[in-house]
Image (cartoon, grey):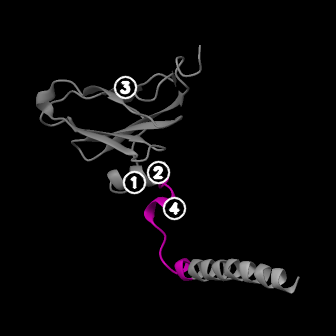
Amino acid sequence: MSSSISLRSRAIEPNRRAVLAGAAAGLALAGLPAPAFAAGTPELSEFVARITEGAVPLREGVTLAIPPLVENGNSVDVRVAVESPMTEQNHVRWIHLIADKNPFPDMARLHLGPRAGRAEISTTLRLAQSQRVTAVAALSDGRFAMAEADVVVTLSACIDGG
């Protein structure tokens, strides 16, 4: 019987060592800086402040047309229009699209100018989940304008067997 007890004690000993080694490794890694993705994505207001260089955008003059409910996030049609005469003195410089819960929230920056004729873009987005989509427009006079829309992304009808 004593031989079986000693075998058990030998079997338990490596497990204790493994646990202690793992705990020591965890404590050693705790002092290292966390990777960027561990902290999560910055708030939407931080994204907007970064692209507007701290300026607060007006919440007027931009129309964001996107369906409030989509079955498949792989292909979401969006249209952004900005009220502007599109002249040399008064035009839209760019339109920036943000999807705050996508792995890469900065989706696109589309550059325009007076020769575009209209400050309007249409594109297809890919949305990872239900979230808020934001369009920010930079105007030639240094001001910014924005619009937001919430989009609910559901499962496709062919996936759930219907």
Q: How many marks?
A: 4
- The image shows residue 4 at horizontal and vertical percentages of 82, 80
Determine the residue positioned at 36% across, 53% down: 55
Residue 24 drawn above or below residue 156: below
Give yes or no for residue 29 being in the magenta stretch.
yes
Given residues 140 and 71, the one toward you in this image is: 71
Q: Secondary structure at mark 1?
A: helix
Numbered tag placed on residue 106 in the rendering: none
- Mark 4 vs mark 3: in front: 4
* Region of the chain picked out in magenta, as a range: 28-43
The disc, 4 or 2, on the residue closer to the chain's N-terminal end is 4
Q: Which residue is mark 3?
A: 78
Numbered tag placed on residue 49 in the rendering: 1
- Mark 1 vs mark 4: in front: 4
The disc, 1 or 3, on the residue closer to the chain's N-terminal end is 1
- Check the picture and name the quadrant holding the N terminus: bottom right
Q: Amino acid at mark 3?
A: Val
Determine the residue positioned at 46% across, 44% down: 100
Numbered tag placed on residue 45 in the rendering: 2
Q: Answer few, some or many: residues within 10 Å of disc 3's Cα (few below 14, many 20 plus, some between 14 and 19).
A: some
> Residue 86, located in which quarter of the rendered image?
top left
Given residues 87 and 128, the one toward you in this image is: 128
> Residue 135, located in which quarter of the rendered image?
top left
- Mark 1 vs mark 3: in front: 3
Residue 150 drawn above or below residue 33: above
Q: Secondary structure at mark 2?
A: helix
The disc, 1 or 4, on the residue closer to the chain's N-terminal end is 4
User: CA–CA distance between discs 1 and 3?
Assistant: 23 Å
Numbered tag placed on residue 39 in the rendering: 4
Q: Are marks 2 and 3 in contact (CB under 8 Å)?
A: no
Q: Answer few, some or many: residues within 10 Å of disc 1's Cα (few below 14, many 20 plus, some between 14 and 19).
A: few
